[in-house]
Image (cartoon, rainbow, N blue to C red):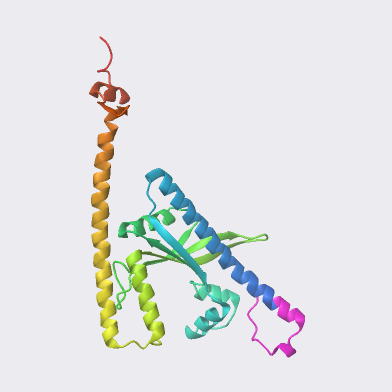
């Protein structure tokens, strides 16, 4: 793509120049929109497959967003990324497209991350684990920069999407922290900062407690399923399965007549 030309007053630009610039920025933003669509479809497939096979859905909900062109340009200037061109934006700004995945439990975060890593046409360019190593302010989440193949009518593009995976507690804390920073225009009183850190520790403790409860419930459920597999119910009457019959399923010979 051609470098982005400095924006001149509208009366000095020809209609052709305006039209060409609009087409270029539309095509550029479309690729990120399509990459998000692709990732959301993959997540929906994983959700449905997991629900059908395991009777459990590790994903509570997802949320996606695209940075606005104005936000992208401001970030380029803020990071001092050099020339304002589409190739340069693509190289320096990796979070134009963002997808947030919210889970119930800590283990779900790494389960979903592993499932995405096993998809061979996706490339994991970067991983930041703010769960094992939280940010100083208490922020916790797993961040992945994933390169996604996007097939256009005339070409294939590989587009970066930032994927954030977190629990409900982490997401609630991050949302509250964002609102506080917005209210105080990023100059938050130290007392509130301390309380935010305490809240982050409380959210982390809650996640660990919920994980323990989840594991205990799963163990009870598996034990009950195992007990049900050893009996049949006909007209509300229970019959235990004879051991000899169970051995036949394994190819045993003890159930055969002499």
Residue at point 64%, 72% (across, down): 26
Indicate the quadrant where residue 134 lies. Answer: bottom left
Locate the N terminus and report the quarter of the image it occupies.
bottom right
Locate the C terminus and report the quarter of the image it occupies.
top left
Q: Residue 116: horizontal and vertical position, in percent?
A: 43, 56
Does the magenta portion include 11?
yes
Count of all numbered marks drawn on residues in the image: 0
Q: Residue 149: horizontal and vertical position, in percent?
A: 55, 59
Q: Which residues are magenta?
A: 1-20
Is residue 3 visible to us here? yes
Residue sticking out furthest to the front: 235
Q: Residue 194: horizontal and vertical position, in percent?
A: 26, 82
Q: Residue 72: horizontal and vertical position, in percent?
A: 53, 78
Describe residue 110's horizontal placement relative to residue 125 as left or right.
Answer: left
Residue at point 40%, 57% (across, down): 59
Viewer-closest of 243 and 251: 243
Is residue 1 visible to us here? no
Residue at point 54%, 65% (across, down): 159
Residue at point 40%, 85% (across, down): 183
Describe residue 123's horizontal placement relative to residue 184 as left or right.
Answer: right
Viewer-closest of 1 and 76: 76
152 above or below 23? above
Does the magenta portion include 103?
no
């Amino acid at each position: 793509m051609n470098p982005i030309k400095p924006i001149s007053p509208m009366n000095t630009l020809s209609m052709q120049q305006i039209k060409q610039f609009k087409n270029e920025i539309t095509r550029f933003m479309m690729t990120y929109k399509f990459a998000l669509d692709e990732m959301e479809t993959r997540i929906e497939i994983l959700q449905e497959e997991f629900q059908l096979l395991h009777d459990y859905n590790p994903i509570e909900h997802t949320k996606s967003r695209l940075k606005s062109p104005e936000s992208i340009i401001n970030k380029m200037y803020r990071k001092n990324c050099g020339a304002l061109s589409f190739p340069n934006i693509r190289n320096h700004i990796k979070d134009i497209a963002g997808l947030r995945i919210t889970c119930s439990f800590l283990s779900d975060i790494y389960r979903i991350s592993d499932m995405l890593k096993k998809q061979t046409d996706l490339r994991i360019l970067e991983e930041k684990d703010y769960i094992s190593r939280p940010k100083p302010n208490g922020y916790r989440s797993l961040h992945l920069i994933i390169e996604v193949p996007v097939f256009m009518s005339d070409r294939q593009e590989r587009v970066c999407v930032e994927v954030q995976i977190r629990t409900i507690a982490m997401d609630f804390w991050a949302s509250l922290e964002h609102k506080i920073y917005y209210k105080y225009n990023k100059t938050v009183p130290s007392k509130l900062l301390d309380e935010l850190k305490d809240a982050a520790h409380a959210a982390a403790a809650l996640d660990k407690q919920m994980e323990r409860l989840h594991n205990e419930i799963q163990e009870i459920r598996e034990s009950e399923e195992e007990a049900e597999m050893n009996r049949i119910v006909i007209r509300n009457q229970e019959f235990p399965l004879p051991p000899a019959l169970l051995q036949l399923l394994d190819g045993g010979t003890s159930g055969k007549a002499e």
